[in-house]
Image: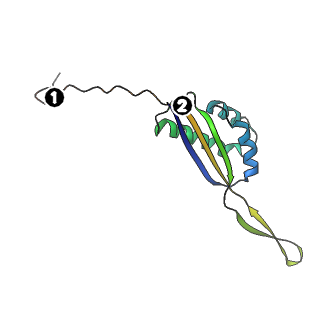
Amino acid sequence: MLVHVKAQAKAVDMTPRKIGIVASLVRGRSVADALIILENTPKRAAGPIVKVINSAKANAEHNHNVKTDNLQITELHVTPGPRAKRFRPVARGSAHPYQKRTTHITVIVAGEEKAKKATTTKSTTTTGKKESK
């Protein structure tokens, strides 16, 4: 059965435009391929994307019992987060406004669920005491 698992990073201190360029490199690929591509990408935006992909991979393995061998990135969204408004002092005592932009990164991966292990019952001794060797 195909399971979809989500991970998010909110308010990453980088502009959505810069992160979006790097995100388009790995959108729709397998998780293993994406991590190799991002490892060799010389952009600072690759770091936060790697973290979110690794988080989605860990969520799939630990929370949803999904095989991590063939996980696929089904969706990778980069959306603008909150902006911090600042002013830069310039000549003649005036100020120019600028904004520090942040980004929300959302990754959804899909993979096959692991086979459930058969439960076995333990046999106990009738006396309930430990057996000595």
Identify the image quadrant of residue 32: top right
Q: Is residue 93 above or below residue 109?
A: below
Q: Amino acid at mark 2?
A: Thr
CA neighbours of label 1 inside 10 A, class few (<14), some (14 to 19), many (20+): few
Q: Disc 1 designates what residue?
A: 130
**Disc nearer the start of the sequence (1/2):** 2
Q: Is residue 102 above or below residue 124?
A: below
Chosen colour scheme: rainbow
Q: Nearer the viewer, mark 1 or mark 2?
A: 2
Q: Is residue 97 above or below residue 33?
A: below
Image coordinates for residue 91, horizontal then vertical, percent: 89, 73
Image coordinates for residue 39, horizontal then vertical, percent: 69, 36
Considering depth in this image, is 73 or 85 the residue closer to the camera? 73
Considering depth in this image, is 7 or 37 the residue closer to the camera? 7
Instruction: Give SS at disc 1.
Output: loop
> Please, which residue is most extreme toward the left here?
127
Image coordinates for residue 101, horizontal then vertical, percent: 72, 58
Is the residue under label 2 in contact with that under label 1 (CB below 8 Å)? Answer: no
Q: Disc 2 designates what residue?
A: 68
**Which residue corresponds to the image point at 54% horizontal and 31% vertical from the top-left?**
68
Considering depth in this image, is 100 or 111 the residue closer to the camera? 111
Q: From the viewer's perspective, is 7 left or right of 48?
A: left
**Which residue corresponds to the image point at 67% horizontal and 44% vertical from the top-left?**
47
Instruction: Give SS at disc 2.
Output: loop
> Please, which residue is most extreme toward the bottom here?
93
**Which residue corresponds to the image point at 25% horizontal and 27% vertical from the top-left?**
121
